[in-house]
Amino acid sequence: MRIYEVKDYQEMSRKAANIMFAQMIQKPDSVLGLATGSTPVGIYRQLVEWYQKGDLDFSKIRSVNLDEYKGLSADNDQSYAYFMRKNLFDHVNINPENTNIPNGLEEDAQKECGRYNSVIQELGGIDLQLLGIGNNGHIGFNEPGEVFEAETHCVALTENTIQANARFFEKIEDVPRFAYSMGIKNIMQARSILLVASGESKAEALEKTIYGPISPAVPASILQLHNQVFIVADEAALSLVKERHGL
Ligand code: GLP
């Protein structure tokens, strides 16, 4: 794991966007694994800025998103499909046909999960997977549990995640209880992984991710076994790592 400590959210966004920039320059038809949540917003803003300056080209880029709420349509302003359009896709020259997100409206979980696994496979796997981290150590919507779920699956969100994500909804009852998420194997097969974290609320999860035992109780801890992981995190998110282990 290569850990980059940065000062704050803004620096985290810039540094992480730089890593994505390098990937896109090296391989203009890269398959980017994309993430949602509040953490990547600044990265997408930076990429849009570079695109507008003419420094980046998304015309050949393919993308696969990590997850989507089950039951929300792509037009629902809380869906991750909507988030991606608003924060990135609508502002760059990516071909919408080259973007992939689980279909939240597909009721048949087995069918949708199978379809999504095939999508990833047909793209030839993911070149660079961007990841945020939940304050319980989840990645995508791989919640803490007894086992690592390998492939795309339907997840019952934990109370912790429902509460953490309630801030985006009018009321907590509106937060969907289920989601489709890429599995740990889908993520681990990415050729490189970029995990970003900002703020003290992520400090515990990040410490366990980097130094804890590898366990499905902290899904992100599996990243210790990947040979190309970049972690870009700010001082607050790395505070416990530094306190307990130095950096
Ligand atoms: C959601 C997403 C994750 C994200 C996490 C943290 O649960 N499914 O992909 O990493 O939230 O979100 P935030 O970046 O807003 O803290």
Image (tube, rainbow, N blue to C red):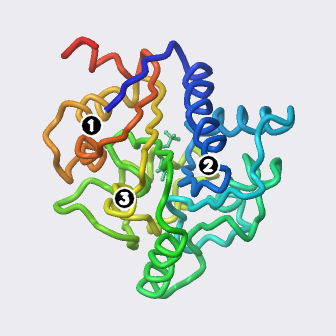
Q: Secondary structure at mark 2?
A: loop
The residue closer to the viewer here, 116 or 9, is 116
Q: Are marks 3 and 1 in contact (CB under 8 Å)?
A: no
Q: Secondary structure at mark 3?
A: loop
Horizontal side of 5 relative to 123 (left or right) equals: left
Query: Earlier along the polypeptide chain: callout 3 or callout 2?
Result: 2
In the image, residue 37 lies at what x, y percent? 55, 45
Label 2 CA crowd tier, 10 Å (few <14, some 14–19, many 20+): few
Q: CA distance from mark 3 to mark 1?
A: 18 Å
Q: Which residue is mark 1?
A: 209
Residue visible at 75% across and 56% down? Answer: 85
In the image, residue 123 lies at what x, y percent? 54, 69
Query: Earlier along the polypeptide chain: callout 2 or callout 1?
Result: 2
The residue closer to the viewer here, 3 or 200, is 3
Q: Quadrant of residue 50?
A: top right
Split into 4 quadrants, where in the image is the N terminus? top left
Residue visible at 54% across and 64% down? Answer: 68
Residue 189 is marked as 3
Type of the residue with mark 2:
Lys
In the image, residue 175 lies at what x, y percent? 53, 59
Type of the residue with mark 3:
Gln
Horizontal side of 135 relative to 8 (left or right) equals: left
Residue 27 is marked as 2
Q: Secondary structure at mark 1?
A: helix
Compared with residue 26, is residue 53 higher up or lower down, i.e. above or below?
above
Which of label 3 and label 1 is nearer to you? 3
Split into 4 quadrants, where in the image is the C terminus? top left
Residue visible at 76% across and 51% down? Answer: 86
Label 1 CA crowd tier, 10 Å (few <14, some 14–19, many 20+): many
Query: Earlier along the polypeptide chain: callout 3 or callout 1?
Result: 3
Which of label 3 and label 2 is nearer to you? 2
